[in-house]
Amino acid sequence: MAEDNKVKDAAKVAQDKMGDLENKLDKQSDKLPKLSDQTKATVTGALPWAAGAFGVLSLLWAKDLWDGIDSINKVGDYLSGFVSTVFPSKTNMWIGLALFVLLAVCVGMAFSRKVLDKTKAGWNFLFYGMVVGVVAGLWYLFALSELGNGRAIWTLVLSLGGLYALFQVRDSYKS
């Protein structure tokens, strides 16, 4: 019983923090250029499909990290001293893998009927996914830079662009 209360309390704190972040980003988005009504309608219609594509892309990137971890494990047994100086740490790769899987789960949850039906819950899942995408992109950029920065830059561009689009069409989603 006490364990359930701790989990509920932690979930409530996380939800409150994400709500605070949403409100702060909403205030900042008011300073950005606004989309026309026609563009908003187009973005609202395309958003579920873009989220689905981003989720699949995230899973592919997670698969690449998994393959990298597997390769490091194999080579690391043989050249442990050399590998640690050339390749990123396995811990950083595991964290990156978890972030990309979490990103895929968030946008996958949003891609369900929640976004297609334009509910606020669907918008929230997309918001969570884009926030995780920014974190994953930054993690990849700084902690996994040995693997190249192209994936990190794409993740950041797509996530930040997704956040901009989300806040532009937020009023289209019902509570």
Image (cartoon, rainbow, N blue to C red):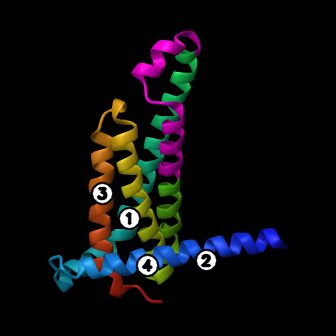
User: Disc 1 and disc 4: Cα gap in Å?
Assistant: 27 Å
Where 100 falls versus 113 (above or below)? above
The residue carrying mark 4 is 20
| CA–CA distance in space, label 4 to label 3 | 22 Å
Decide: is 64 above or below 139: above
Name the front one of labels 1 and 3: 3
Amino acid type, callout 2: Lys
Is 41 rendered above or below residue 126?
Answer: below
Q: Which residues are magenta?
A: 77-101
Q: Main secondary structure of the magenta part?
A: helix
Expressed as whole percent of the image width and height from the top left, the position of residue 126 reads 43, 69
Q: Earlier in the sequence, mark 2 or mark 3?
A: 2
Q: Nearer the viewer, residue 174 or 32?
A: 32
At a point 47% along the width and 67% down the height, the residue shown is: 111
List the residue tagged with mark 2: 12
- Residue under the point 44% across and 29% down: 88
* Of residues 136 and 101, the one drawn nearer to the viewer in this rendering: 136
